[in-house]
Amino acid sequence: MGTVPLYWGEARDLAELIGGDSRPHWAREVLERRFSLTPLDFLDEGALAGQSRLLLAQPRGLAAQENVALDAWVRRGGRLLLFADPMMTGDSRHGIGDRRRPQDVILLSPILRHWGLQLAFDPDQPAGLRWGEIAGRRLPVNLAGHISLAELGAGEREAAALCAPNEGGLWVRCRLGEGHIVVIADAALLDHAGPWPGAREGLDALAALAFGESGEFAGADLSAAIGTASNGENQPVCEPGWPKEGGSDMP
């Protein structure tokens, strides 16, 4: 689910979609190597029932009942991979303001704060593709956001996610009840015009990290990384990462 058209491709109209003439998104082929995909347009208990994994690719702002359903689903054991880009940079055949265009700015502040996270954007950072790094894998990023801990009141801390500590802020992986979430503060990896160098491998690695599929990150368990991490006030800590200073730009 998301405004990045991973499943249907970027169709101009219903006729193009039905006729199969829309340009497919390269990411669908990557995902379907290991997963059977089910497109969703609304998150509620019925839509999420029977699903163990969820990919949100720059989703629209969620309604209150969707936030509640998503939170409950993750806490029951769901695994979420969320691309939340505060400044989308990918090209689209649809103009600004067109509802078919990927959403330029992510609107998920309520659910992120509920999980103890906040997403920020530095407008002074240089534009252009560069290499980011997540769990030892390099992947393309462009005008990425920064995820950090939100300042929470005492009544908010019990609902927040628990995350392993690290430096930076490009991504975060957290345990939430019986489930876990991986949030990426950029979506250049999913540019329809791509794939950019490293995008296919990056998406495959992220899916393995978030969904525990076979591969280098198979069965990634946060328990050992988190241990007893806490500041004594049940304040969550997070596991972010950021492109290393001095790292090479994208080719």
Image (cartoon, rainbow, N blue to C red):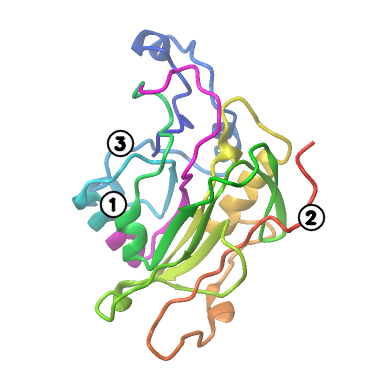
**Residue plotted at (24% across, 50% down):** 66
Q: Amino acid at mark 3?
A: Asp
Q: Amino acid at mark 2?
A: Gly
**Residue 41: mark in rendering:** 3
Residue placed furthest toward the front: 124
Mark 3, other Cα within 10 Å: few <14 / some 14–19 / many ≥20: few
Q: Amino acid at mark 1?
A: Ala
Residue 128: percent from left, percent from top: 67, 36
Q: Secondary structure at mark 3?
A: loop
Q: Nearer the viewer, residue 186 or 13?
A: 186
Q: Look at the magenta stretch and give its main secondary structure.
A: loop
Lower position in the chain sequence, tag 1 or tag 2 = 1
Circle 2/circle 3 CB separation < 8 Å:
no
**Residue plotted at (30% across, 73% down):** 159
- Quarter of the view holding residue 134: bottom right
**Residue 246: mark in rendering:** 2
Residue 106 sits inside the magenta stretch? no
Whole-Å distance between the Cαs marked 3 and 1?
A: 14 Å
Q: Mark 2 or mark 3: which is in front?
A: 2
Whole-Å distance between the Cαs marked 1 and 2?
A: 45 Å
Q: Secondary structure at mark 1?
A: loop
Residue 129: percent from left, percent from top: 68, 38
Q: Residue beneath label 1, please? A: 49
**Residue plotted at (29% across, 56% down):** 110
Whole-Å distance between the Cαs marked 2 and 3?
A: 41 Å
